[in-house]
Image (cartoon, rainbow, N blue to C red):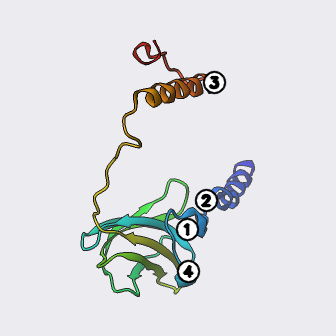
Amino acid sequence: MVKTVVMLIMLLAVPAWAVVRPPDLEPNDVPFACEPNLCLSPVLDWQIVTPDIAAIYAVRYHDSRGLDTELTATDPNGAEILVQSLGRFRDPEGGWSQYYQIMFTVSGEGVHYIELETTDKIGRSDCRTLLVLSISDDDYFILPGSPPLPVARIKDAQRFWQYAKKNNYPVTKPTSVLN
């Protein structure tokens, strides 16, 4: 009798520690400017890609019953999207997880709003937005900040080492600059 009661309590408590839906990203959490009004659903994640080069993104759908699901991905800007199901597996935290890979190619620069929607066999669905920033492969490089002035460089080096010492950085005193 005690074993039965314990088993029932454990079975009823499983949803308490089961997998939960991840929180939605706020527009401030995205490292590039986007228009929140163009998102048809809450933001799941973001990615930065190069135009006309295929990118792959992985997503997981969690279901407590293990029903087959379909994932559709659409982009109003016309990105080419291919969805591949990777199979359904028992989740160690309870329930089942269905994994998908999404391969997409966006043309041109700008922000794309890819809508991901899953639907199971009984009609339940969830929809999230993947924000994609497409930027061209512009050259970027490091330039010197100022012309090489010996006096300014020594004073800058002294300020740098004093700052590092005040903030307890594990640095040693450079003998060639400060002597």
Up/down of 2 relative to 108, above or below: above
For marks 4 and 2, give the CA distance: 24 Å
First in sequence: mark 4 vs mark 2:
2
Assess disc 2: are there few (<14), some (14-19) or many (≥20) residues with their C-alpha within 10 Å of its C-alpha.
some
Q: Nearer the viewer, residue 172 or 25?
A: 172
**How many marks overall?**
4
For marks 4 and 1, give the CA distance: 23 Å
For marks 1 and 3, give the CA distance: 54 Å
Image mark for residue 41:
4
Q: Secondary structure at mark 2?
A: loop
Image mark for residue 166:
3
Q: Nearer the viewer, residue 64 or 19?
A: 19
Image mark for residue 85:
none
Residue contact between numbered discs 2 and 3, judged by CB atoms under 8 Å: no
Q: Secondary structure at mark 3?
A: helix
Task: Name the quarter where the C terminus is drawn.
Answer: top left
Q: Which residue is mark 2?
A: 18
Q: Secondary structure at mark 1?
A: loop
Image mark for residue 64:
1
Q: Amino acid at mark 3?
A: Lys
